[in-house]
Amino acid sequence: MDLNEFIRLALAEDVGEGDHSTLSAIAPEAVGNAKLLVKEKGVLAGAEIARSVFNQFDPALSIQTHIHDGAFVKYGDIAFEVTGSARSILTTERLVLNIMQRMSGIATHTRYLIEMVKHTPVVLLDTRKTTPLFRHFEKKAVKIGGGENHRMGLFDMVMLKDNHIDYAGGIKNAIIKAQQYLKQNNKTIKIEIEVRNFRELNEVLEVGGIDIIMLDNFTPADIKTALSQINKTYQVEASGGINQDNLVEFAETGVDYISIGALTHHVKSLDMSLKAKIEKN
């Protein structure tokens, strides 16, 4: 979604017919200052989006950035200050906090997992398990935290999962149909296919013509066996049941990618607040 359109819709959702609390209590000419206060340690993310929110709602607001996205932060740090119309600051406050708290939580958790496996060449990927209409920002937070994005949506990769395979009538049919579809539509996007066991893996290796194999719910020991069979012919992704407790064991198998849905769907927001003061009534 376009950033400006997202901000417009998000403000419309929150403000509706008007911010009656602010309009009733704050004079139109009041000037204020507010500081983004970090209240726990983590990785900052979303500061640039916050600037866009302020600027789109009120171009006269002035933002002074002290800490940039991707930096480690701790309790008491001030990420930025915003100065201008007190009404504008109050009306945009919650949207800015909602964006930054969630993005910073995702970036923090991603960085934590990245540090766990930095001794391996594995790449950590997010998934499509995201908040509707907020996917772009959640995936941006993963990248800020040091991970990489899998496909952004259904449009930028052919991803043949278990249900696609079953509906298509098996591995061979699914791959051949996908290849034909791409050729007929002049598409050059990659084909990834999920396998649930060694029988399906062998079928994929027999048919070929794909780019990435996803080993779904394979144990680390089985992944090592599968990698020896694949023999670097295709890139390999591990997925399913992988979390911070077993991540290192999976990463040390030598797999190319590990996808973790919890990067975006099971994350605690980073605590922060916008502390305001009046400069001129």
Image (cartoon, rainbow, N blue to C red):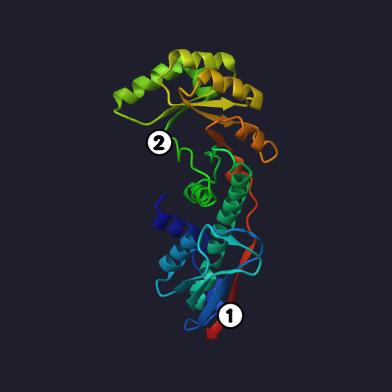
Residue 269 versus residue 148 in the image, above or below: below
Counting from the top left corner in percent of width and height, residue 38 is at: 62, 66
Residue 241 versus residue 183 in the image, above or below: below
Observer able to see residue 90? yes
How many tags in the picture?
Answer: 2
Mark 2: which amino acid? Asp
Counting from the top left corner in percent of width and height, residue 128 is at: 52, 39
Q: CA distance from mark 1 to mark 2?
A: 46 Å
Report whether 4 appears left or right of 199: left
Q: Give the residue at mark 2.
A: 156
Mark 1: which amino acid? Lys
Report whether 127 appears left or right of 189: right
- Secondary structure, mark 2, is loop
> Which residue is nearer to you in this view: 71 or 279?
71
Counting from the top left corner in percent of width and height, residue 183 is at: 31, 23
Residue 200 versus residue 126 in the image, above or below: above
Could you say which quadrant of the image residue 36 lies in? bottom right
> Which residue is nearer to you in this view: 103 or 167?
103
Q: Which mark is residue 277?
A: 1
